[in-house]
Image (cartoon, rainbow, N blue to C red):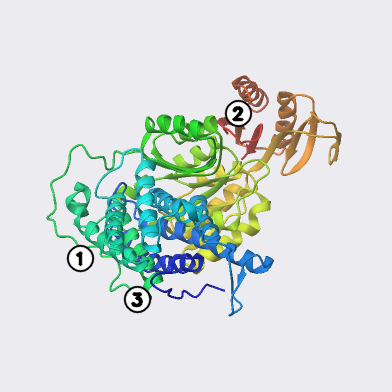
């Protein structure tokens, strides 16, 4: 059951106040989401800032709600006269809130919002003796720390953005605190300071001035601070964050040095488990690869965001630094040129087991979800990918039978949000590649789905894997270290070496005919294996073409498709 936001006394700042702040902020961002998307022109005019802020706040609020629910179930909270249970401390609440934002951050704006909440948590979550005296001073200090940490997280801070708005809010809050203001007074001052700073952003950033809009991310900050004031005072903000109406500066001439359509083609985001020294090196490396670099987090867990032309290199840099996961690669494609707020008519979302495959599918225009061996994306992750595709119609390629239920649930939820979704029951990445090859975004949705389904269904799939232990299979008993050749999900061949086993698998798969063989090589498989298999196919099947791709990190040793 959703938490009912209740106003708090003006001088009280506790776990329940944070819970109310989170609930009100999520509601405010939900109301402003479409308007913020519509004025999103910087750093990339891809009309998703409002959506990214909302999804980040949703993840944060979910984590906070789970913390309260867990406390209620375990009885670890403090029982009030009313019978309600809350976490044992303000620290527990703000840290759960910030962590939820970190793991669920979306896009450039959502990543910065996550760092702002982390800054708030660093102060409100400190031990009592480490805090300033009085709720007003404590809140002002938290807002200042938030702005400082957000600026530090961005490789090249730009004024006229949400950073500027957060900084102005912090200064206004400090001024109110110096005048012995309550927490509610500080929140109101910060809200007013943010609104004033937002109105000035078109005069600070040329892209905003030319478009005649204020900063989209800054609108989100105003919404979040308005929710803070409402949570502490019980008074509702007079109006939603201004968008076009707040512009007071005339449009400015174009800046020839500013990048627009010629900017990087991909957005790469991932969570990273790594040490601070490793992350410092990662920042320097990624800064040389692209722009819009934001790295937030700490204590061993980070959220990395960057715009690049080579997504594989950005992910590989994360592999060098530590353990990247929940990797999301989005191709901007025509989003830069569609104008503000317009969704694509159709998009494809593909689940793929390998960084190389993710890059390959992204180049074909698909939004990708990268999976690691032994892991499967949850419904929420698939739904997020459908949302990131930002289209009216989405074709979802789950890539495995174990993902069908999650894909179906994600599709159902997306349909409830007004997106038309079709799930093609692909059972392997090679079937997804076959479907992508015939994808026609300009044709009718039904015809496109039928063609993609037919292409996937006409593709037999094989996979080579190494047995981890002795086991009974459909082809007999295998020993640890044996190479297993699977066809359509069943073990068909047991061999000693990968090339020989692959040849046996190809013989069986081509026995019933075929026109094209697709080979996807794992990261440890040398090119010589591909050359051997291509020659083997050519020698026995002159009319069959062969195409080879690199699956990259996390892919199986060898995937085979026969169409």
Q: Position of residue 211 (x, y in %)?
A: 20, 54
Residue toward you, 51 or 103: 103
Query: From this viewpoint, is residue 548 visible?
Result: yes
Residue 363 in the figure: left or right of residue 198: right
Quarter occupied by residue 153: top left
Name the residue at 45% across, 29% down.
281
Residue 62 in the figure: left or right of residue 250: right
Q: Quadrant of the N terminus?
A: bottom right
Residue 60 versus residue 496 in the image, above or below: below
User: How far apart are the two marked residues, 2 and 3, measured between alpha carbons?
Assistant: 58 Å
Closer to the N terminus: mark 2 or mark 1? 1
Residue toward you, 38 or 229: 229
Residue toward you, 321 or 429: 321
Name the residue at 35% across, 68% down.
184
Residue position for label 2 = 523
Q: Position of residue 178 (x, y in %)?
A: 29, 59
Asked whether the beta carbons under mark 3 and mark 1 sit within 8 Å of each other, the answer is no
Residue position for label 3 = 235
Residue position for label 1 = 245
Q: Residues within 10 Å of mark 2 (few under 14, many from 20)?
A: some
User: How far apart are the two marked residues, 2 and 1, measured between alpha carbons?
Assistant: 53 Å
């Amino acid at each position: 059951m959703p938490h009912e936001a209740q106003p708090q006394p003006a001088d009280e700042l506790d776990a329940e106040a944070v819970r109310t702040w989170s609930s009100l902020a999520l509601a405010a961002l939900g109301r402003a989401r479409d308007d913020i998307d519509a004025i999103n022109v910087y750093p990339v005019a891809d009309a998703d800032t409002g959506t990214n802020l909302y999804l980040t706040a949703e993840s944060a609020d979910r984590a906070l709600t789970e913390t309260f629910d867990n406390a209620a179930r375990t009885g670890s909270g403090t029982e009030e006269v009313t019978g309600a249970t809350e976490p044992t401390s303000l620290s527990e609440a703000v840290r759960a809130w910030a962590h939820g934002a970190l793991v669920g951050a979306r896009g450039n704006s959502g990543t910065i919002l996550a760092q702002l909440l982390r800054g708030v948590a660093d102060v409100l979550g400190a031990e009592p003796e480490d805090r300033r005296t009085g709720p007003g001073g404590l809140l002002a200090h938290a807002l200042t720390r938030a702005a400082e940490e957000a600026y530090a997280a961005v490789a090249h801070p730009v004024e006229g953005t949400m950073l500027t708005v957060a900084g102005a809010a912090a200064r206004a809050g400090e001024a109110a605190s110096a005048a012995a203001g309550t927490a509610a007074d500080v929140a109101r001052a910060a809200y007013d300071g943010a609104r004033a700073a937002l109105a000035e952003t078109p005069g600070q950033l040329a892209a905003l001035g030319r478009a005649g809009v204020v900063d989209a991310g800054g609108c989100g900050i105003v919404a979040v601070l308005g929710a803070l004031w409402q949570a502490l005072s019980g008074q509702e903000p007079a109006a939603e964050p201004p968008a076009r109406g707040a512009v007071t500066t005339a449009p400015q001439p174009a800046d020839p040095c500013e990048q627009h359509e010629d900017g990087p083609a991909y957005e790469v985001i991932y969570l990273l488990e790594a040490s601070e020294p490793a992350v410092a090196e990662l920042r320097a490396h990624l800064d040389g690869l692209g722009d819009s670099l934001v790295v937030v987090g700490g204590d061993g867990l980070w959220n990395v965001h960057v715009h690049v032309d080579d997504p594989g290199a950005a992910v590989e840099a994360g592999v060098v630094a530590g353990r990247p996961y929940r990797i999301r690669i989005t191709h901007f494609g025509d989003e830069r040129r569609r104008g503000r707020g317009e969704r694509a008519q159709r998009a494809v979302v593909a689940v793929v087991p390998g960084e190389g495959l993710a890059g390959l599918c992204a180049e074909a225009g698909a939004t990708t979800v990268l999976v690691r061996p032994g892991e499967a994306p949850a419904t929420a992750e698939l739904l997020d990918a459908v949302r990131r595709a930002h289209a009216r119609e989405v074709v979802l390629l789950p890539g495995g039978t174990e993902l069908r239920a999650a894909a179906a649930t994600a599709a159902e939820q997306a349909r409830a949000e007004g997106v038309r979704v079709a799930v093609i029951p692909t059972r392997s990445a090679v079937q997804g590649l076959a479907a992508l090859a015939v994808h026609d975004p300009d044709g009718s949705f039904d015809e496109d789905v039928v063609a993609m389904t037919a292409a996937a269904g006409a593709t037999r799939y094989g996979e080579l894997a190494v047995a981890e232990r002795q086991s009974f299979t459909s082809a007999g008993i295998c020993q640890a270290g044996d190479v297993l050749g699977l066809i359509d999900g069943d073990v068909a061949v047991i061999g000693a070496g990968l090339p020989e086993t692959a040849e046996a698998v190809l013989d069986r798969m081509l026995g019933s005919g075929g026109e094209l063989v697709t080979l996807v090589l794992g990261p440890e498989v040398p090119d010589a294996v591909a050359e051997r298999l291509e020659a083997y196919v050519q020698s026995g099947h002159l009319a069959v073409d062969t195409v080879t791709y690199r699956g990259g990190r996390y892919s199986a040793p060898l995937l085979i498709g026969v169409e």
